[in-house]
Amino acid sequence: MAGNNQDEAAHPPPDNQIRSDLNEDVDVSETNSEDIKETPSEDIDPETEEVATEEGNQRSIREMLDDEGTESVFVNRDLVEPDTIIDEERIVGRDDQLESVVSFLKPTLQGNRPPNMLLYGPAGTGKSLIIGAVTQQIIDLCESKGERFGVVDINCQPINTLDQAVYELVQSVASDVGAPVGVPETGVSTKRKYRRLYELINNHYDSVIFILDEIDLLVGRRANDEPAHSKLLYQLSRASNTNEIEGRVSVAALTNDPKFMQDIDGRAESSFNPRDVYFPDYDATQLREILDNRRDAFREDALEDGVIPLVAAFAAQSHGDARKAIDLFRGAGDLADERGDGEVTEDHVRESQEEIDKDRSLKLVEGLTMQKKVSLYATAAVASYSNQPRSSVPSPVGFKIYQWVTDELDADQMTRETYVKYVKELSTYGLISTSRKSRGRGGGMFMEFTFTGDPESMMKRIVDDTRLEAIAEKEELLHTVVNTQLRDFHEQ
Ligand SMILES: Nc1ncnc2c1ncn2[C@@H]1O[C@H](COP(=O)(O)OP(=O)(O)OP(=O)(O)O)[C@@H](O)[C@H]1O
């Protein structure tokens, strides 16, 4: 189109200018020779609406719009979205866990109070899936008997304080029953939020289950205080004994941390007193079955034979996480579609896996808040600068380095609990694994972090886009501080 030079294409005019450009009658006599040279290779004939290409082919706009390209490999892509709630028939390899959860929750149907539960095991092993599937059936069965069974479900990962957690619970019930939240997010006491929560529950449910996902990440902000998760478990699990909730109440806490119960306060432990359900990793055979049960996400002839075994093998390597398997399965399909290949091949799987590995740390680091970046940087510095040939980081040492870095940067300093929470969060992305260690008799417990990839490249990535450059310049000093702290820690 006349006057459409490359500069304008690179820097599009603001909206109002585009509009006035569209309204303007173009005066061809003003078109200069520069403009003519830069006429794009496609132009539209106003009479026929045909597009003339350099090759001289003529395709109408309608033809181009109608052109569907290669048929998508998917027929039901939702089935390979991680948040899709799947039918019971698609659940694989969790018979024992299903049986336990069903038997624990069955009393609800007989008018009795079910026990509290702790569902624990690594990420992506079906904890949310199983509790979700069973509670959904109970909702339906209760409904058919005219009883109201409430499922109040929150994920604690993004929640920082007890107050926020209680507010989230209120919101969750309010949205389920279609009532107003009825309490402001800030400016009122946590007690008032609890009151509103109990009021909503008493008005709308005969019995209720609280599902608290990633409970271990709800630590709260204050140091040397009882962790927020412990306080919440205490309050909720005794709410029916104290008659604050009139109906039957149970609490299901979900966590990746097998030693979670060691963190909670004695009185919370005795009022919560859960029945445990353990969810182990999936092996490659189980992952294969999980994927096989979702192959109808794809067209019948769209999966090359080796695709499912290869996806399962990759996911089995990364701690048997079904979510990762499903993500990779979908990613390979998306890649096949992007390329218009019409079939998903093992090459698509391998390429997707490479992309996932490459992107994971980059995306993660980009999305982190400054405090999380500093926490990660300090932890990676310990793994990377340690003179010992091991890359595990005791959390007390990581925290000391975090304090040193924040001092150097003159930045805010979080508590040790918050630092640990931030670093633990990274395990959900598979960048580090966490384990709990004992310092021997009377020495207490601490978390140990191990990087799955190279901690040094992680540090570089963080430095690339933050104020941490100032610390990177003090590399030698940081090296010394790390090794002094490690020595002190191991000599204690
Ligand atoms: N046994 C299974 N059969 C079929 N699909 C499964 C199974 N286990 C997990 N999945 C699927 O894997 C994904 C992750 O599962 P889920 O969210 O239940 O894991 P989780 O143990 O709660 O993980 P996290 O600890 O990270 O919250 C979901 O899409 C779920 O449908």
Image: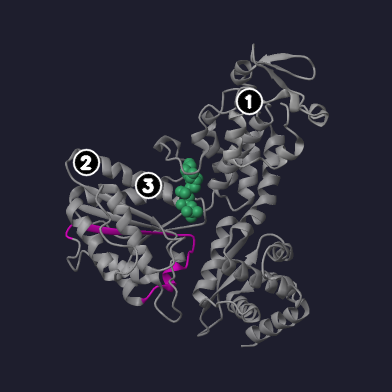
Question: In the depicted view, which residue is nearer to us: 292 or 354?
Answer: 354
Label 2: element kind: helix
Disc 2 C-beta below 8 A from ligand 1:
no
Q: Residue at x 60, y 16 (%)?
A: 62
Give the alpha-carbon distance from disc 3 to disc 2, as whole Å.
16 Å
Image location (x, y in percent) of residue 308: 61, 35
> Which residue is under mark 3?
132
Q: Is there any visible trace of residue 306 in the rendered image?
A: no
Labelled disc at residue 143: 2
Residue type at the position of mark 2: Glu
Label 1: element kind: loop
Residue 284 position (above or below residue 56): below
Give the alpha-carbon distance from disc 1 to disc 3, as whole Å.
61 Å
Give the alpha-carbon distance from disc 2 to disc 1, as whole Å.
66 Å
Would you say the residues marked 3 and 2 are in contact, meaning their CB atoms lie under 8 Å apart? no
| Tag nearer the camera, 1 or 3 | 1
Check the picture and name the quadrant holding the C terminus: bottom right
Q: Answer few, some or many: residues within 10 Å of disc 1's Cα (few below 14, many 20 plus, some between 14 and 19).
A: few
Residue type at the position of mark 3: Gly
> Which residue is under mark 1?
25
Disc 3 C-beta below 8 A from ligand 1:
yes
Q: Earlier in the sequence, mark 3 or mark 2?
A: 3
Quarter of the image where one finds residue 353: top right
Q: Earlier in the sequence, mark 1 or mark 3?
A: 1
Residue 249 magenta-drawn?
yes
Query: Does residue 106 appear to the left or right of 299 in the view shown?
Result: left
Q: Answer few, some or many: residues within 10 Å of disc 3's Cα (few below 14, many 20 plus, some between 14 and 19).
A: some
